[in-house]
Image (cartoon, rainbow, N blue to C red):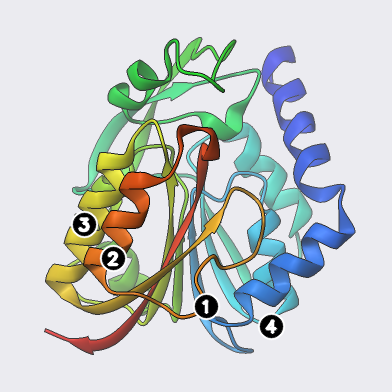
Amino acid sequence: MSGPALQGVFRSLRLYYGDPARQTAMDALYARFVKPGNLVFDIGAHVGDRVSSFRRLGARVIAVEPQPAPARALRLIHRGDRSVEVLQAAVADRPGTLTLRVNRANPTVSTASDAFVAAAAGAAGWEGQTWDGALTVEATTLDALVARFGAPAFLKIDVEGFEDRVLAGLTHPLPALSFEFTTIARAVALRCIARLSALGDYRFNLAIGESQKLNEAEPVGAASMVALLSTLPHEVNSGDVYATLTSEK
């Protein structure tokens, strides 16, 4: 690993593993969706704080991360754990290759979306972020992962403005999932909701930022979640939408 890449990974490790209270809250949130023995896909696993949470809950995890340095960190953290498999790849709407825009100082926001990079330019809260590298990475699809490993009970997607492209590669509904949203790329989240609504009857909730708390007392329908995401203030910056399937279409 080069100097900037190594420093970026160490930054992520400090950020995501240094707060035990956050880990406890994360486990409580995911316990709503993940039970012992469940299979979980973590798409955009980065350095694996969510992977560790899923393992504490007793799940088997397929962790998918395209960046070499975080993928190596994941393998080191979970070495010897047969319930974690790390795939160094991206997930998209079709198999092949894609270009990953790398932020070496802050690799957690590396992305395959040029539109996301453009939206961050000059946006409040994104000052100083620079995508100063590029990688050609192998890409697979959710359908291909399901065919290889089986259908997960829970799917987590966090790929910086590429979430809609990930879900475009899924043709069968899953019981529960989450995807990241950002206020600089709200249209991506709305396309995710539309895709899920085409696959099944989903109900939605969201967690703001890294709160690890669901915002709504009860899950809401697609139209209500679209309205909520559309009116969030820019300063919210990001969070995760949670979707649970009530019936297939």
Q: Quadrant of residue 78?
A: bottom right
Report the Cα–Cα distance between label 2 and label 1: 13 Å
Residue indicated by mark 3: 169
Q: For the residues marked 4 and 1, what is the alpha-carbon distance in whole angstroms?
A: 26 Å
Mark 3 burial class by Cα count in 10 Å: few <14, some 14-19, many 20+: some
Give the CA distance from mark 2 to mark 3.
Answer: 25 Å
Q: Amino acid at mark 3?
A: Gly
Please name the amino acid that badge 4 sits on: Gly
- Quick one: label 2 or label 3, which is nearer the N terminus? 3
In three-dimensional space, the C-alpha distance between marks 3 and 1, rounded to whole angstroms, equals 31 Å
Image quadrant assignment for residue 90: top left
Which is in the foreground here, disc 3 or disc 1?
1
Between 11 and 190, the residue placed more toward the observer is: 190
Could you tell me if residue 91 is visible in this image? no
Tally of numbered tags: 4
> Disc 2 versus disc 4: distance between alpha carbons?
33 Å
Disc 1 designates what residue? 217
| Residue on which the image places disc 2 | 224
Q: Is residue 136 above or below residue 57?
A: above
Asked if the residue at tag 1 contacts the one at tag 3, i.e. Cβ–Cβ closer than 8 Å, the answer is no
Q: Secondary structure at mark 3?
A: loop
